[in-house]
Image (tube, rainbow, N blue to C red):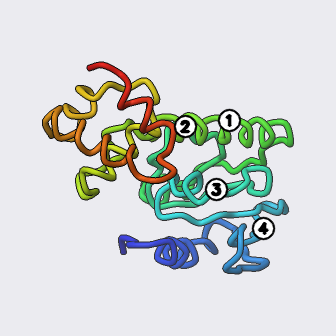
Amino acid sequence: MIPQNELGVIVVFAQEVREIGVEFDSIQSAFPDAIVFKDGVNYRIEFELKSSHFLQHGHDPRKCDLIICWEDDDRDNTIPTLALSDTDWKTQKWGLPTKSEQEAAYWRQRAILAERQLKVQETPQQAIGNAAPKRDQIITLAKMRPRITQAEIARMIGASVSYVSEVIKEIDSADAAPSYVSEVLNEQS
């Protein structure tokens, strides 16, 4: 059986664990998913379809001793991982991470998440989006980049400079026009 989700991973593991000397103490829907005993040692287990889901779900590595997954696809993962798709998973040695290893994993995970967050920060083109009306796109760009020129706005939204200029004048003449619009209006392209 090839699991299609986390529950499938639990089923595959549960079918095979007795022969490797593992006993379930508890299983739950909350993190961590299970407590198991192997060779007289307690392990806090988190089941995932892919090891990368551990990071995506924001689990705390300080509260987990072992990830059991179908596919170990996360090279950034620092938590001991057992991939059930590996034919030799039953013979792999288990070991508890030390408190300092878990603490290091926690801070590494936070750094990875922060780095990924920076990579997905929006560029002005992404922020304005293709679906937004051009008038809204102009306002958004003026807010995001106070020193942007009308020519840059026109290029970014696929409009003429004269159209951008007319929209900015219209917005600027409205009552309580935001100052960022006036700044764009007064800049020369």
Is residue 127 shown to the viewer in this render? no
The residue tagged 1 is: 108
Q: Position of residue 2 (x, y in %)?
A: 36, 70
Mark with earlier residue (4, 1): 4
Q: Is residue 23 above or below residue 148?
A: below
Q: Residue 58, labelled with which disc?
A: 3
Q: Are marks 1 and 3 in contact (CB under 8 Å)?
A: no
Q: Nearer the viewer, mark 3 or mark 2?
A: 3
Secondary element at image label 1? helix
Mark with earlier residue (3, 4): 4
Q: Nearer the viewer, residue 43 or 145?
A: 145
Residue 64 shown left or right of residue 10 in the figure: right
Q: Quadrant of the N terminus?
A: bottom left
Q: What amino acid type is highlighted by mark number 1?
A: Arg
The residue tagged 4 is: 37
Q: Position of residue 50 (x, y in %)?
A: 47, 57
Residue 80 shown left or right of residue 118 in the figure: right
Q: Residue at x 59, y 66 (%)?
A: 47
Q: Is residue 45 above or below residue 117?
A: below
Residue 86 shown left or right of residue 40 in the figure: left
Secondary element at image label 3? loop
Secondary element at image label 4? strand
Q: Are marks 1 and 2 in contact (CB under 8 Å)?
A: yes
Cα gap from disc 1 to disc 2, whole angstroms: 9 Å
Is residue 130 shown to the viewer in this render? yes
Cα gap from disc 3 to disc 4, whole angstroms: 25 Å
